[in-house]
Image (cartoon, grey):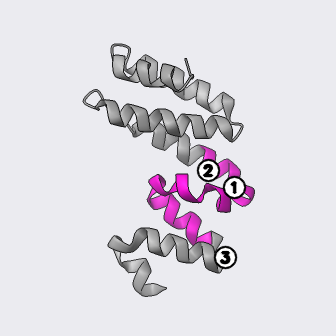
Amino acid sequence: MEVLENNFQATNTYARFLCQEGKTERLMALVREKPFLLDDYYDYLLPRYTTELKMHMTEYCKTMISKDSDRLQCKVLARKLVLLKDLGWEEEVQSLRGYLLGKYPAKRMLKQALQQARLL
């Protein structure tokens, strides 16, 4: 386990191993460092870390795109917002949507991605 933990190229393997072994505390520590893993492992962490996951995911979504982001990044962000909505975090999704549209009012790709995801 220590070899996997220190191997940055084996992040997904390490996360899967932690799930199989039921090491939710270590998995949450890994997700804190690498929030992109949340999509794959939220179901293991949700019952115990719901509040913290909301906080990490909303902060991660705020930083996912910039004024230089392309269409793919906007679509990935929209998928993450749909995931949050499916988890029942509608209030957080509305807040993020307002924040992002306020920060990037001229970003048509963002608006289109949100419309396609039925978030606008």
Q: Position of residue 44 (x, y in %)?
A: 66, 62
Residue 53: image tag:
2
Would you say the residues marked 1 and 2 are in contact, meaning their CB atoms lie under 8 Å apart? yes
Q: Quadrant of the C terminus?
A: top right
Whether 65 is among the magenta residues is no
Q: Which image quarter: residue 6?
A: bottom left
Q: Secondary structure at mark 2?
A: helix
Amino acid at the residue labelled 2: Leu
Q: Residue at x 54, y 48 (%)?
A: 56
Would you say the residues marked 3 and 2 are in contact, meaning their CB atoms lie under 8 Å apart? no
Which contiguous range is marked in magenta? 25-54
* Tag 3 residue: 22
Position of 48 with respect to 118 (left or right) is right
Q: Position of residue 49 (x, y in %)?
A: 68, 56
First in sequence: mark 1 or mark 3? 3
Position of 95 with respect to 44 (left or right) is left
Q: Which image quarter: residue 20?
A: bottom right
Residue 19: image tag:
none
Position of 10 with respect to 88 (left or right) is left
* Tag 1 residue: 46
Q: Main secondary structure of the magenta part?
A: helix
Q: Residue at x 42, y 33 (%)?
A: 75
